[in-house]
Amino acid sequence: MSSSPGSAQASSGILDQLNKTSSAEDFFTLLAVDYDPQLLNVARLHILRRMGQYLVSEDFSGQPDTVVAERCKAVLEKAYADFVASSPIDQRVFKVLKDAVKPPKPPTFVPLTTLK
């Protein structure tokens, strides 16, 4: 069975390619987004994680591949810009970094009168 242009398979082409991409550089190349290799070396996982956070709110159903590719490009550019403007520590996209700034929980108070 062959698929015609404009079918669901054709419209998911860029998403399929992104799913098969294995490096941050490949994401930037595939979506034609310029980047500074030094910044990417420091923040690659943070940028891709932020991109994923932004993509969660996107709905690509029924969209042509060109629209999906442009939206993905815009989202990657936005995620990258977050880390041009500040550091991974400032952005805190990973739980371990978020937890590092949470105030410690106060100890649970157990009155002596409750002990037997």
Image (cartoon, rainbow, N blue to C red):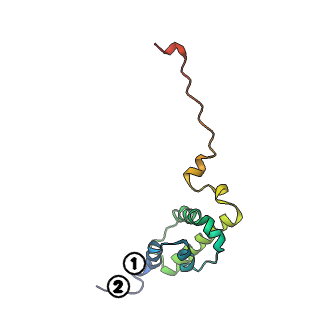
Q: CA distance from mark 2 to mark 1?
A: 9 Å
The amino acid pointed to by label 2 is: Ser
Give me the residue at 64% from left, 59% from top: 88
Image coords of residue 59 (percent x, y)? 49, 67
The answer to whether the residues at label 2 and label 1 have Cβ atoms under 8 Å apart is yes
Q: Is residue 55 above or below residue 8?
A: above
**Image mark for residue 3:** 2
Which one is earlier in the sequence, the residue at label 2 or at label 1? 2
Residue 79 seen by the camera: no
Crowding at mark 2 (Cα within 10 Å: few <14, some 14-19, many 20+):
few
Q: How many marks?
A: 2
Q: Is residue 56 above or below residue 105?
A: below
**Image mark for residue 8:** 1
Image coords of residue 14 (percent x, y)? 47, 78
Relative to the observer, which residue lies in front, 62 or 77?
77
Image coords of residue 105 (percent x, y)? 59, 35
Q: Residue furthest right?
A: 85
Q: Is residue 22 above or below residue 10?
A: above
Image coords of residue 68 (percent x, y)? 51, 76
Give me the residue at 67% from left, 60% from top: 87
Residue 66 seen by the camera: yes
Residue 84 found in image quarter: bottom right
